[in-house]
């Protein structure tokens, strides 16, 4: 199996962060800028966090790069993967969450990452992970179809079995068991991925990372000028609560970041700037809000049903 090249992965991830920030800024307006916070970690490594706040199109967008390393993993990670005990490690990735201002533009999340653990005299342990997913407040068939077509297009050059496999994994992962509902309409999720060797796996991770903007920006452009009122805004803030619940209770990246001593501001930049909860809220029957639950927050084979 070909040898891992962490320096090449890091170079790609830094460039990906740059490209996504430039595209999001351009899609917002001419004055939208990301604030950057370079940070370092006492145990080893650091990163650069970039956040755009109070834009015209995006109420908040955070695009993070991190590269952390150390002589030993947190006990929680070693317990999950005993073969990692006693190894030095490095983990790097780009993670982003975009919270639009207009309720008709979906929230979106993407992440691509690489992990490497080494020990003298033994073969390295490494893998890639990542994906992207979409969380609308108001569903549109054409948006969901485009999103999943883009996900499939990112997968097919590497293996036509990847899209159905990683689509199903995404549906399973981004699920709120205490609410008995998915977080959104899914996309891709993969982890512990080594593919047919390092170069094959690295190529696939790049395809997913590069595919995010192609999947998301056409949806933003279709919906960002849609008229909305107080009702739609209140529902958007209510649905953001589900996003908060998932990220704080279930997200692996959040847990790893906190347990490995990561920078809290960067880890929690995925949370929206405004959110609300309402006790016992139910959508009005026949409303657009009810349609979200009945049609879009359901496990579906979107490409077959909407094609």
Image (tube, rainbow, N blue to C red):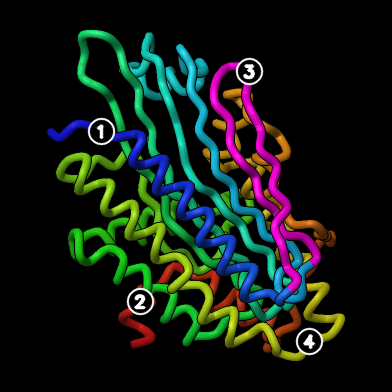
Residue 47 is situated, as x and y percent measured from the top left of the image, at 58, 36
Asked if the magenta segment contains residue 32, the reply would be yes
Q: Are marks 3 and 1 in contact (CB under 8 Å)?
A: no
Residue shown at 50%/82% (left/top)? Answer: 143
Q: Earlier in the sequence, mark 4 or mark 2?
A: 2
Above or below, 35 relative to 102: above
Residue 4 circle label: 1
Q: CA distance from mark 3 to mark 1?
A: 26 Å
Q: CA distance from mark 4 to mark 3?
A: 46 Å
Total marks shown come to 4
Q: Nearer the viewer, mark 4 or mark 1?
A: 1
Q: Earlier in the sequence, mark 4 or mark 1?
A: 1
Circle 4: element type: loop
Residue shown at 28%/54% (left/top)? Answer: 204
Q: Crowding near pointer 3: few (<14 within 10 Å), some, many (20+)? A: few
Question: In this image, 78 relative to 35: left or right?
Answer: left
Q: CA distance from mark 4 to mark 1?
A: 49 Å
Q: Residue furthest right?
A: 230
Residue 189 is situated, as x and y percent measured from the top left of the image, at 40, 53
Highlighted range, magenta: 31-54
Circle 2: element type: helix
Q: Earlier in the sequence, mark 1 or mark 2?
A: 1
Q: Nearer the viewer, mark 1 or mark 2?
A: 1
Question: Which residue position holds label 2?
Answer: 149
Question: In this image, 32 relative to 140: left or right?
Answer: right
Question: Which residue position holds label 4?
Answer: 228
Residue 233 is situated, as x and y percent measured from the top left of the image, at 81, 76
């Amino acid at each position: 199996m070909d040898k891992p090249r962490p320096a090449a992965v890091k170079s790609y991830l830094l460039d990906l962060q740059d490209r996504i920030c430039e595209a999001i800024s351009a899609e917002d307006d001419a004055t939208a800028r990301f604030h950057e916070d370079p940070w370092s970690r006492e145990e080893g490594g650091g990163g650069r966090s970039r956040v755009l706040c109070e834009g015209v199109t995006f109420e908040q967008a955070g695009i993070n790069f991190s590269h952390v390393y150390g002589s030993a993993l947190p006990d929680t990670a070693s317990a999950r993967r005993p073969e990692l005990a006693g190894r030095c490690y490095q983990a790097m990735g780009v993670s982003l969450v975009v919270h639009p201002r207009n309720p008709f533009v979906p929230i979106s999340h993407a992440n691509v990452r690489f992990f490497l653990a080494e020990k003298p005299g033994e073969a390295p342990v490494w893998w890639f992970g990542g994906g992207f997913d979409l969380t609308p407040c108001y569903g549109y068939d054409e948006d969901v179809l485009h999103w999943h077509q883009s996900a499939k297009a990112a997968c097919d050059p590497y293996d036509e079995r990847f899209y159905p496999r990683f689509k199903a994994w995404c549906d399973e992962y981004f699920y709120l068991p205490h609410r008995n509902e998915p977080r959104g309409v899914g996309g891709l999720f993969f982890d512990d991925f080594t593919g047919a060797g390092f170069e094959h796996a690295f190529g696939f991770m790049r395809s997913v990372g590069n595919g995010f903007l192609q999947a998301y920006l056409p949806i933003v452009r279709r919906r960002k000028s849609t008229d909305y009122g107080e009702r739609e805004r209140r529902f958007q803030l209510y649905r953001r609560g589900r996003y908060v619940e998932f990220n704080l209770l279930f997200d692996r990246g959040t847990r790893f970041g906190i347990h490995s001593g990561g920078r809290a501001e960067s880890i929690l930049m995925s949370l929206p700037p405004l959110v609300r909860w309402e006790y016992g809220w139910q959508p009005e029957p026949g409303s657009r809000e009810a349609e979200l639950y009945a049609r879009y927050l359901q496990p579906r084979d979107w490409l077959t049903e909407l094609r």
